[in-house]
Image: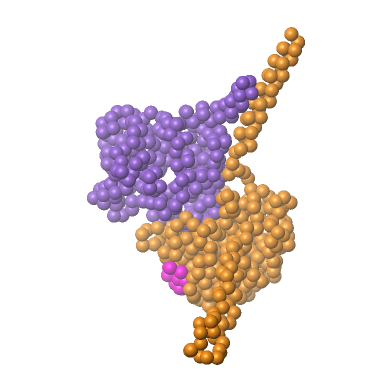
Chain colours: A orange, B purple
Amino acid sequence: MISRFLLGAFLAALMLVTGISTYLYLGGRQSHVSAAPLNPTLQTPSPRAFTLPGTLFLVQDGAIYSLSAGRFHQVTTAGGWMQPSLTVDGNLLVVRKSSFYSDIFELNRFGKRLKQLTFNAAPPRSYDTGNNHWAFYPRMASDGKTVFLSYDKPKGGYEVDMSIWSMPLNGGLRQGTDWTYSQGYTGGDMQPVPVKGGIIYTKYLRANDGSIISQIWFVNRPYPYTLYAGRALTKPDQDCREPSISPDGRSIAMICTYGKQISNLVVAPFNGSSIGAMKTVISNQMVAQPTWAPDGSGIAYLAPGLADAPFQLWFLPRNAYAPPPPGPSPSPSPIGGGPQSSPAGSPSPTPPPPVVVVKPIQITTYQGFDAASTLAWAT
Amino acid sequence: MAMGLSIVSGGLAYFIPAAYTAVQATGQVVEIASPSPSGLLFSPTASPSSPQQVGAFTVLLLGSDDDSKFSSDHVLTQSMILVRVMPATKTVVMLSIPRDLWLPLSTGGMGKIDGAYSYGRAGAAIATVQENFGVHINDYIWVGLLGLIRVIDAIGGIDIVTSNPVLDDYYPLDINTNSPYGYSRIAVLAGPQHLDGTHALQYVRSRHNDLQSDFGRSRRQQQVLLAIRQKAKQLSPEDIPALAQAIGGEIKTSIPLSRVAALLPLASSFDNPDAIRTIVLPSPYTHGGAPDGSLYPNWGYILPLVHQYFP
């Protein structure tokens, strides 16, 4: 009797354990599509063994991180921080975005707040949300005194479009200058990059088919009242944006969508005000925010990782887009007998060297960085 | 046998909540509000197909503002998208119908097409589209604002190339709030990025600062739908309970549960982005001047286009 009772109890326990195990097993087989990105400073997983030169600043979930010598360090707490860029003395210009407005700050490399450059919150007791302003994508000019940015002024009613502005680092937007006239109801002009003799930036415009496209433009001085002032560096159907200039100033990297839901990494020669032949170097990824290494060794960018993980850090070595020049071509060696020589004695061309395909390197695996935020790369 | 029973029990315990939610959301019976060729009771029978379109079917996607400003079953459809799926050729056509289109409603009288759902729910919306556009709709899927947020969050967000900055100083602050008539500011920046449900909704819902108004919004909605499809390809059957729990009550469809299961692998087989055609209907397909700021259809242009892609 007791043995039958024990057997029954054992079977009941076994069924309970098996049932729970089945439930847990099925739960464990869920995909990881909804898993939250990992904090970059976690030791495991760490960035891949490939170590990037200098210090790279990136953004995840409203916090700025630095990547140096293969290790991440958290620069700011999570609080709407985004779009870092470098000042000439090595500090950071960053945006802090809240629900209704965004402002530009100067931080040191360790995240200490040095200065607030803009004050875009609506006045106290203002109930009109339109009295707030956005400021995005700050970039310092080489003079170390002038900051370029995208700013949503002028605006009115439902029309909110960004224009490119400049302002003194030690002043404010009251002393600012409006450089561009944006097309209404497109989002406007974004992501200025100061270059020698002017700025390049991304302009959003209406295309012939009615859709809105992006173009890289160059302008050499303020044109606050002229829509098409300056020079378009790319064509409308290329839909290019997010320009980045190489450290020597002679190349430009950007992304171009050609109207599709992908973004190619494109590089081209740049002479200061116009670009040469464009070359697509990555065409099978959703590339964002290409940024040149300060030592010219390659281009970092953000793109979904393998298995479509959220945007990860990638690095494209220089050889992928600027392969070393081929060695001197073989010249026919003088062989006696001239034209009458047997085929065996004719100049034999050296077989071409095997083509080495340089692939981009995925640096991080699980982090999930903010792809609408620029990268900043210091030496 | 005991082991087998307990394994089955564990599996049932895992999937039953999802099955319950799925049964509630799927297989909705639709009553067509006006006489139509398909009869009074909508039935998901396959439409006549050419040999090249064996198994092809058409779904009407309906997206509604179901925030607290509206009673739950009398909401407008902010988004109406006809989707034609052709499994044999692995091609998809998506045609966005302007919400402001002024035409005869199946419930009687003239009005904006976005009101059809409000007057007669899904049946009226389907009948209005069928009668005016001359298409046969096999099924519908309706999703509310929270449903879109929850679907996108449940699949871990979407990766998308937003075509331009979407800035809106007067974006409705009407979800999860006691003050549904308030406003917020939004700034969805342009370019490739990862969007969670809330920001994806901002991207597809805002239309104040768009040069193309509702047509621009339609293009953005199509982009987000394609991004959802891309992300959904990574899901496994074990994800269904969590997904069902997330979207419970926020999605309704006439597609029966058995067909939903059959369609999941089909969705993942559409790999070529060039095989997905997206269509919007700006001028000359439509033009302004209709009552209440709505749009007149130019059927001379619209119907040949519709018959080409929705035979």
Look at the image and tell me in which quarter the C terminus of chain B lies.
top left
**Percent position (x, y) of residue A281?**
53, 66
In reply to whether residue A241 is colored magenta, the answer given is: no
Q: Determine if residue A178 is in view.
A: no
In reply to whether residue A230 is colored magenta, the answer given is: yes
Q: Place residue A316 in its image quadrant.
A: bottom right
Q: Determine if residue A351 is in view.
A: yes
The residue sitting at 62% across, 52% down in the picture is A368
Residue furthest to the top:
A1
Magenta stretch, overall SS: loop
The residue sitting at 51% across, 58% down in the picture is A284
The residue sitting at 53% across, 51% down in the picture is B159
Q: Is residue A190 left or right of residue B300?
A: right
Residue A24 or residue A84, whichever sits in front: A24
Residue B9 in the image: above or below residue B177 = above
Residue B88 or residue A224, whichever sits in front: B88
Q: Place residue B118 in its image quadrant.
A: top left
**Percent position (x, y) of residue B199?**
53, 48
Residue furthest to the left:
B300
Q: Which residues are magenta?
A: A227-235
**Percent position (x, y) of residue B286?**
30, 51
Q: Is residue B289 left or right of residue A21?
A: left
**Percent position (x, y) of residue A289?**
57, 61
Q: Is residue A182 left or right of residue A377?
A: left
Look at the image and tell me in which quarter the N terminus of chain B lies.
top right
Residue A218 or residue A352, whichever sits in front: A352
The residue sitting at 71% across, 56% down in the picture is A72
